[in-house]
Amino acid sequence: MQMDSQCVSCLLHRGLEEAQLATTNRALQLRVMTELVNGMHYSLTKGKGVERIPAYIGTVRDQTVQKMTGCPDPYASLKRQSNETALRLLPKLEDFVEAAKTSEIQFQRACIAASLGNVIEYGVSGHEIPWDTLDDMVSCAQEEMAIDETSLVWRLLQNTRSALFLTDNAGEIVFDRPLLKIISELGIKVTVAVKGAPVLNDATLEDASSARLDEFSEVITTGGSAVGVIPRWCSKDFLSRFDEVDLVIAKGMGHWETLPEFSVPKPTAHLLRTKCEPVARSLGVSKGHNIVKLLKPHKGRFGPLTAK
């Protein structure tokens, strides 16, 4: 997904939030924002190819904030709180899934819950995490599905031996647990990938441990800290998984922004919540909906997912 005019203000809005979380020094905050504006100007006027993907600019923004403030993880406290709150909702999530009468409907409900979990994201302009009503949203999450291709994914899983599950945010990963459980119970070898270092409020190994994701899968890292998947910030070992597995399951808007731009040799199921207008428009839906969309293996304008 390429830059939209609305992406500019959102990227800077997030940058300010991160700077304020990273330091209380207002003079330093101003210097950070000045550097972010300069970087944004460069990307918009001289950036080419991958450099014009919102996720790429967001990754550079986070690296800038961390380097200038000396704070390696501005969202650390919020991520811990997100995991703790989400774990308290886990019994309701499990009841919602297990109440279904067939395995396929349980799978559909698990996908819906995982998509809904993508609301747990900080800093998106115009989006607030509905912590007070999130438990009530579980039971009506199906009504907010704008694209529901879970039946296609379910049929694909019947002939799948291995899957790569790309996580998104801390807290959200708790909502992924019922889906990971179902996939692993089908006898599929699941590899879960979290970020190798902090970026936004994305999950890292510490968060995966908190959510006990290793109960259902092998947990690895991307080898770096990029929003979505951007090869230059990923390890060769991680990128090789795209060639080894039968199916990729990608959570969140960052993966929707990046993966379709590269050549992905395996089918990819995207699960997300449309939290901003540009992403919603790219999917042909309105903002505030849950999405399960299956993409066939495809060629992208920026070539294969290989480390340089």
Image (cartoon, helix red, strand yellow):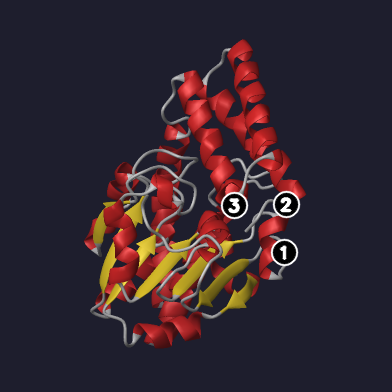
> Image height check: is 281 above or below 22?
below
Distance from the alpha carbon under mark 3 to that under mark 1: 21 Å
Distance from the alpha carbon under mark 1 to that under mark 2: 10 Å
Give the SS element for disc 1. helix
Q: Give the residue at x 49% y 47%.
A: 227
Percent x, y for residue 206?
Answer: 30, 42
Q: Give the residue at x 34% y 50%.
A: 222
Percent x, y for residue 246?
Answer: 33, 76
Residue wearing tag 3: 49
- Quick check: marks 1 and 2 in contact, CB under 8 Å? yes
Three-letter amino acid code at disc 2?
Answer: Asp
Examine the image and state in which quarter residue 279 appears: bottom right
- Quick check: marks 3 and 1 in contact, CB under 8 Å? no
Specify few, some or many for label 1: CA neighbours under 10 Å numbering under 14, 14-19, or 20 or more: few
Along the line of sight, the residue nearer the viewer: 172 or 26: 26
Specify few, some or many for label 2: CA neighbours under 10 Å numbering under 14, 14-19, or 20 or more: some
